[in-house]
Image (cartoon, coloured by chain):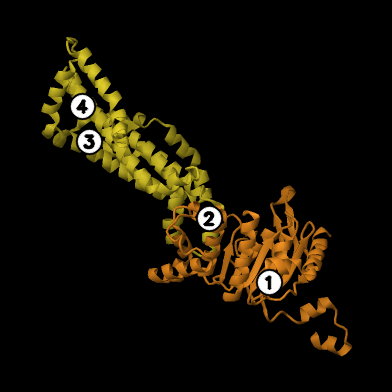
Amino acid sequence: MASAHARTGVVTAEAAKRAAPDVDAHVHVDRLHHVFGRGAAARTVLGSVDFTVARGEHVSVVGPSGSGKTTVLRCVAGLLTPTSGQVRLDGAPVAGPPESLAVVFQDYSRSLLPWLTVRSNVALPLRGKGIPAPHRRERAAEALAAVGLKDSLHQYPWQLSGGMQQRVAIARALAYRPEVLLMDEPFASVDAQTRSDLEDLVLRLKRVYAMTVIAVTHDIDEAVYLSDRVVVLSGHPAEVVESVPIDLGADRDQLTTKSDPRFARLRARVLRAVRH
Amino acid sequence: MRHLRLVAQGLALPLLLVGAWWWVSADSTSPYFPPLREIVAEFADTWLFTGIRDVLLPTLGTFLAGYSIAIVAGVVLGVALAANDAVAGFLAPLLEFLRALPPIALVPAFISVLGLGEEMRISAVVFASIWPVLLNTIDGVRGVDVVIRDSVTVFRVPRAQRLLFVTLPGASPQIVAGVRVGLALSLIAVIVTEMVTSADGVGAFSRSAQLSFDLPAMWTAIILMGFVGYTLNLLFDRLEKRTLRWHLRMREPAS
């Protein structure tokens, strides 16, 4: 097929996608279609959602609430089997939570275990990896230090502020050393100051830990500020309406990046796509 | 200082009531309500310490055996049923019926099937106390937050660790509440079965004292069981505070 196009010299975008399977796609969300419920109550949430994420890329998925962003994320995490279509991780279809993937959930107060200390919370996922206890504790302490919580090891999550709890959730994901990090509205439940602190924390961590990141958010500023690319979901059922590369470079900070005219242009472009 | 005041406050009413009992009953000639003085003398005679060994220990043995079987079986079955919606749904009406059945109503049936021995009494205690443990365990396990469940699923926490570090602790507030209800029901069951089987034990002792018009002895058994129940509840409170510390402190208003 590729040779046929080469002969005629006409390559449509659609054909190009088919002809050149994303060899370097780390995550491929492939024609994801999902229907909740059955019969009269059936509700099609995802039409055919299709996008890829390269290794090491940070992609934000934005869209109006109810647009199925979280459904996409749950399919990538292996928590939900789509009605049709699939998610491929390094080419292998996802069936159940992949070993190399971690999630930061929106609701930190519900995703952390209140009966375990901060360190035990971070160390718990390492039990399945066959890591001996002293190493688990060490790795948990390291990850907590990386998010600025080295003094809270022995506290319980509910003794910490919301922002600190979300840091614990991030540390839990980091200690797991995932290749893919998913974040579901990670900063939606914290105050504005904490939110920009956490955004900068994520930027910093991205440089230290080489991870592919997919974040779902309804906050367009945050999506543009943090990502290498923003994927816009829209419509009922949802489709990808636009994929906006964010060419703001790797060095970003709250003041200069957010007042950069390019930031404003990209922000406007994403916003238009969301409202489309 | 503050501690002392609390202790004094806690003891004030019991001391007052005992004093009143002592004073009112001092000149009592009613055979049904002997003077407290006599009861106390009888108590020392009867229970210190041969009575505790020969009568109270068998009662506590039956209680402990039945109660611990009920807790272990109730939690194990509860976890299993909570994991299996179809079976749990199928069994739900039966479980609710058995729970609603006053456990003592089944004692005659237990006697005809199992006889008058220790197995019968232990079975009656198990039957009395297993339902709240079982049903609360099912509820508790199901009530573990979905976000917590998603988290441990995503992080591939293995099954055994999941049960130990996630499911059981998550369900523990409800399990403990069921176990507490079971405590009271177990004590009732052990005393009643002893009364109807005239075994060794406090229930049988009190019943036979009553039948032979030894009413001071009967009263001592009642007082003894009061102390036993009170002590067990106190121990339970301790245990609850320890195991559910996170749960209790989480609910305190933030400082």
Q: Tell me which amino acid carries mark 2.
A: Ile
Label 1, label 2: how far apart the Cα atoms are: 33 Å
> In 3D space, how far apart are the residues under numbered discs 3 and 2 (Cα atoms)?
43 Å
Q: Earlier in the sequence, mark 3 or mark 2?
A: 3
Residue B123, given in percent of the width and then of the height, sits at 30, 39
Residue displayed at 19% across by 25% down: B220
Q: Where does label 1 land, which residue?
A: A252
**Residue ID for mark 3:** B59
Q: Chain of mark 1?
A: A
Q: CA distance from mark 4 to mark 1?
A: 79 Å
Chain under disc 4: B
The residue shown at (28%, 28%) is B11
Q: Nearer the viewer, mark 3 or mark 4?
A: 4
Q: In this structure image, what is the colour of chain A?
A: orange
Amino acid, disc 1? Arg
Q: Which residue is denoted by mark 4 in the rendering? A: B221
Amino acid carrying mark 4 in the image: Ala
B158 w.r.t. B18: above or below: below
In the depicted view, which residue is nearer to us: A51 or A244?
A244
Disc 4 element:
helix
Q: Which residue is mark 2?
A: B148
Q: Chain of mark 3?
A: B
Q: Is residue B42 above or below residue B4?
A: above
Visible in this render: residue A210? no
Query: Which mark is nearer the camera, 4 or 1?
Result: 1
Q: Position of residue A53 (x, y in %)?
A: 69, 73
Same chain assignment for discs 3 and 4: yes
